Image (cartoon, rainbow, N blue to C red):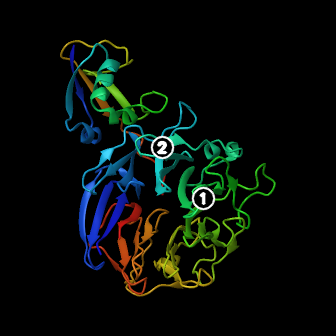
Amino acid sequence: MTVTLAIPTMLAQLTGAKRVTVDADTVGGALRALIARHPELQVHVFDETGALRTHLRLFHNEDTAHSLDEGVADGDTVTILQAVSGGAGESG
Amino acid sequence: MTVVLAIGTVKGGWTATSEDRRSWMVAGPFMKGWEVTAFGRSHAGDALLSAVSPWYGAAIHRSPDLETWTQIVEGPAYAEEPERKLSRIWALESAHGRTYAGVAKAGLFASDDVESWTAVTGLNEHETRSAWGPGAGGLMTHRLLFDPERSDRMWCGISAVGVFRTDDGGETWQAKNQGVAGTDPDSEFPEIGFCVHGLTADPDDPNRIWRQDHAGVYRSEDGGDSWERIQNGLPNESGFGFPVVRHHASGALFLAPLESDEYRLPVGGAFGIYRSTDDGNSWHRSGDGWDGTPTYDGVLRGAMDCDQLDTPGVYYGTTGGTVGFSSDGGDSWDTLAVRFPRISSVRVLTA
């Protein structure tokens, strides 16, 4: 299936594009295909345990993607969304 | 001599370049939108930076020319431990053919090529680890010192744990905080629980170390085995502050005192860099060039550096986004004509 990934602005600095097209059968497969092409994204999308980072959400077309195993159809869009949270951090 | 100053802020990095240390050309931002928490050099000479986003985590980037930056794909990372995740990289230092990264949650990683990293387990799994706790800024390894003559000997500073030293190449580490105020003597590990902020050492005698601690300013003459308080002349009774840097040829020391840990403000709004020319025995507000405007900015741990030219160049960045500099060892001060975001790191990368 040809799937379009919508990339948030900060990560598009690494991909060079805000929309990337990959071949995949699932939401997780689309992410893996993206990371295969841009391996530096691994640490930014997943933490060390392999879990999706806390303040990211995935959308499959217009709806929340409930699982990385969720199937995708030809022409679908998977959006990596920077949640409106998580802005706090450590200080120097 | 060209001096390149690297400036890391909560929203990206900049460089300031000067031939005379008076007029500066500012370039950037690079890593736009990312907090740049530290700069350094790999042992092979590439510039390094660490960048982090609260949403996207932390990574190291390398550059051969300070213009193009490439992310290290396999950077430092803890093994799959849900309770210990790497959130930020606060120190990038190289010595004896290796590059080290000090990180939060507190830990140390080493690399021979900066492309692959291994945990320094002698420190990361230290017998006192269960009692390590964060300060206001978190739990992180942020200062690294090396013995220029001995590759098996180094020091690291961890907030809010203290200073550790290894004498066997990182296999074992001993807490080195005796004489520093502020711990609970009845705790399970009374040798830790100290919030070190800044460290600098004399490369000609690495046993001489100066320490800006949460609890004040200290000096060690024995590699950290013991510490004595040195605050004569400072404006703050607490001795509180974050960075301390040293110009090695002259021995001049510089720090940026703040009123106390509760307030973290320059005393009376009189921001200034304090200097010692007698190894820390006495301190004086250095030079002129302070405009007299009440200023309540602070200087964070990694936001001050000193070049090693014959006449010291001293540089600081503030929480208010000002970069100040002196090209005459602190006799006079000026500021860059650019107002940056909150500054996390300032580093002289070439001089």
Mark pair 1, 2: CA separation:
22 Å
Which is more toward the observer, B16 or B11?
B16
Of the 4 image quadrants, the one containing the N terminus of chain A is top left
Q: Could you tell me which residue is drawn at 36 percent across and 81 percent down?
A: B327
Q: Chain of mark 1?
A: B
Q: Could you tell me which residue is drawn at 54 percent across and 64 percent down?
A: B148
Mark 2 crowd level (few <14, some 14–19, many ≥20, 10 Å Cα): many
In terms of sequence position, does the residue under pointer 1 or pointer 2 come before the other? Answer: 2
Q: Could you tell me which residue is drawn at 52 percent across and 40 percent down?
A: B118
- The x and y percentages for residue B286 are 47, 85
Compared with residue B287, is residue B174 higher up or lower down, i.e. above or below?
Answer: above
Q: Left or right of A10: which side holds B132?
A: right
Task: Please determine if labels 1 and 2 lie on a single subunit.
Answer: yes
Compared with residue B332, is residue A58 higher up or lower down, i.e. above or below?
Answer: above
Q: Which residue is mark 2?
A: B87
Tell me the mark number nearer the camera, choosing from 1 and 2: 1
Mark 1 crowd level (few <14, some 14–19, many ≥20, 10 Å Cα): many
Q: Which residue is mark 1?
A: B155
- The x and y percentages for residue B39 are 40, 57
Q: Amino acid at mark 1?
A: Trp
* Secondary structure at numbered mark 1: strand
Question: In the current view of this chain or complex, which residue is farthest to the right?
Answer: B186
Q: Amino acid at mark 2?
A: Ser
Q: Chain of mark 2?
A: B
- The x and y percentages for residue B154 are 59, 58
Which is more toward the observer, B171 or B165?
B171
* Secondary structure at numbered mark 2: loop
Report whether residue B29 is seen: yes
- The x and y percentages for residue B234 are 58, 81
Labelled disc at residue B168 = none
Question: In the current view of this chain or complex, which residue is farthest to the front?
Answer: B149
Report whether residue B338 is seen: no
